[in-house]
Amino acid sequence: MKVKCFDLCEELWTKSRTAYITEHEVEFESLKQAIKEHDIPMPTSKYMYQYNKRNVLPKDKITGENYDIEIQDRQSEKAKLFEKWSYFDEEKKENIYKIYMDLKIPEKQAIQWYLYNTETTENYKVSLNSF
């Protein structure tokens, strides 16, 4: 996706980066890299807090030319996995993806540890609920 430098700056001063990538369907890392590479000024958290409360604070001005910036479009999960599995042929990738999508992972699983206190020789049971 191509976007003008000044337009990107203006949008990032009115919404969060997460809102921007959701709205425009671009990769977060690509946006982050473009911000750093082109020295686009970012608002502080105080500014965004005040902006969301409808209080207007002065913005930092961006200087220079209004040139195009290339930001990578968001890839599907399947495309990302296929990129990681580049050493397999296409048929093998499809089979692996099919198996991957059929996996059932439990939503919550309790994990328990037994801790042993060497000074008092007592056992303690500790539980942790993970995803």
Image: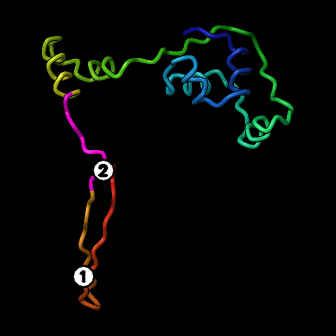
Q: Position of residue 48 (x, y in %)?
A: 73, 37
Residue beneath the point at 81% across and 24% down: 61
Q: Position of residue 6 (x, y in %)?
A: 73, 15
- Compared with 81, 107 (above or below) is below
Residue beneath the point at 30% across and 19% down: 78
Looking at marks 2 and 1 on the same chain, the residue that comes earlier in the sequence is marked by: 2
Q: How is the image coloured?
A: rainbow
Q: Residue furthest bottom?
A: 120
Is residue 8 left or right of 113 when viewed as pictured? right
- Compared with 99, 64 (above or below) is above
**Circle 2: is it few (<14), some (14-19), or many (20+) Cα within 10 Å?**
few
Magenta stretch prevailing secondary structure: loop
Is residue 69 left or right of 131 when viewed as pictured? right
Q: Nearer the viewer, mark 2 or mark 1?
A: 2
Q: Within the image, what quadrant is residue 4 found in? A: top right
Residue 6 forms part of the magenta stretch: no
Which element type, helix, strand or loop, lies under badge 2?
Answer: loop
- Numbered badge on residue 123: 1
**Circle 1: is it few (<14), some (14-19), or many (20+) Cα within 10 Å?**
few
Write down the region rendered in magenta: 102-109
Please tell me how many numbered marks the rendered image carries.
2
Residue 106 forms part of the magenta stretch: yes
Cα separation, mark 2 vs mark 1, equals: 25 Å
Which element type, helix, strand or loop, lies under badge 1?
Answer: strand
For label 2, the residue is 108
Is residue 43 left or right of 70 when viewed as pictured? right
- Compared with 57, 97 (above or below) is above
Is residue 93 left or right of 131 when viewed as pictured? left
